[in-house]
Amino acid sequence: MNLELLNILRCPKTNQRLKFESNFLVSQDKQNRYVVEAGIPRFVDENNYANSFGLQWNLYPKTQLDSHSGHNISANRFWKATGWTEHEIKDKWVLDVGCGSGRFTEVALLAGAKVVAIDYSSAVDACSKNFLNNPNLFVIQADIYELPFELEAFSYIFSLGVLQHTPDPKKAFHSLPSLLKKDGKICVDYYEKSFKSMLLPKYWLRPLTKRIPNQKLFVFLQRITPILLGFSRLIGKLPLIGKVLKRAVPVANYHGILPLSKQQHLEWSLLDTFDWLSPEYDYPQTSKTITKWMEDAYLKEIEVLKAEHLVSRGKK
């Protein structure tokens, strides 16, 4: 167990320091024990509401990594959303909340940050394997509502594409600012809630699809995504109304948007369509709401903007 990491870890139930003993992290009063499996501290139950994410990222662990795609898609989104620079996060402790297989973890690592990457799902296994033996990466399976860290442990915190999939996004957000050092920076993004977005097919399909076992839904989407993707592209070619009509097809279509190969387009479409239809929770937010959350957390230099998703960022 890395001593630097151990120094900032705390028991999520008692806030006591933890001691590493025979593949377990043990609280000072010996009442709470957390297994360290495959080098990853596990502070959550094996099965939870984020199982769908664990499934997809362990099946396709490298698809959205820039090092795999050969493009700067994840890096461009990360730097545009956060507004940070490589220089400022170099050698700093950075918390990636909801890391998945590590698409944004990779960006921060390449900038020289010390990254603690957490996820509620088994996607932590994919993230750990993707950056095996990187001395600046610390992967933890943890619950955002019971985070296992001392207060003011991090200089930077980001969570991209995650909080809308938690049971209570407001509570999830408010669990983060206390972990920031003074003058530390935070960046969180969400799906945007609007009349236009609520007409998207995923919102009228989800009441059904989220009840389908994840494995069955994923296998079904593997079969049908190529068909839906081809149909979406065909409709998109219609003059005047094509771009509008193709939004009614329940598939993520990045043709003409992302510089991907045919196979990469198919994989990204599959993963993001599954991400639309499988999560147990999906709560998009408005600019007004997330601004209020930032203000209630007494953050300063608050900015709310559109950068692919609805982004809020600020400083402690």
Image: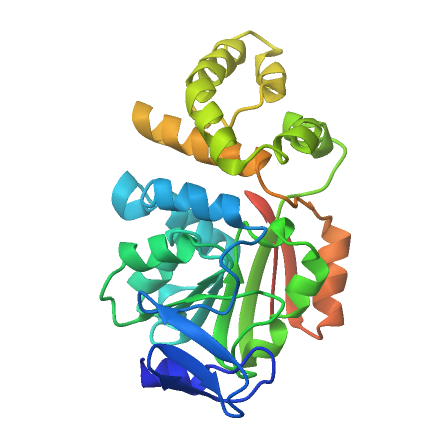
Report the colour scheme. Answer: rainbow
Q: Name which residue lies at 58% across and 85% down.
A: 15
Quadrant of res 60: top left
Seen from the viewer's position, the closer of residues 39 and 87 is 39
Q: Nearer the viewer, residue 4 or 290?
A: 4
Q: Vertically, is 230 above or below 83?
A: above
Q: Residue at x 70, y 66 (%)?
A: 294
Residue 284 in percent (x, y) is at 69, 45
Residue that extends furthest to the top in the rendered view of this protein: 238
Above or below, 179 against 44 in this view is below
Q: Which residue occupies the extreme bottom position in the image?
A: 29
Q: Look at 51% across and 66% down and name the residue there.
A: 142
Left or right of 113 on screen, residue 16? right
Relative to residue 183, is residue 164 depicted above or below?
Answer: above
Name of the residue lying farthest toward the left: 133
Q: Position of residue 143 (x, y in %)?
A: 56, 65
Dividing the picture into quarters, in which one does residue 110 lie? bottom left
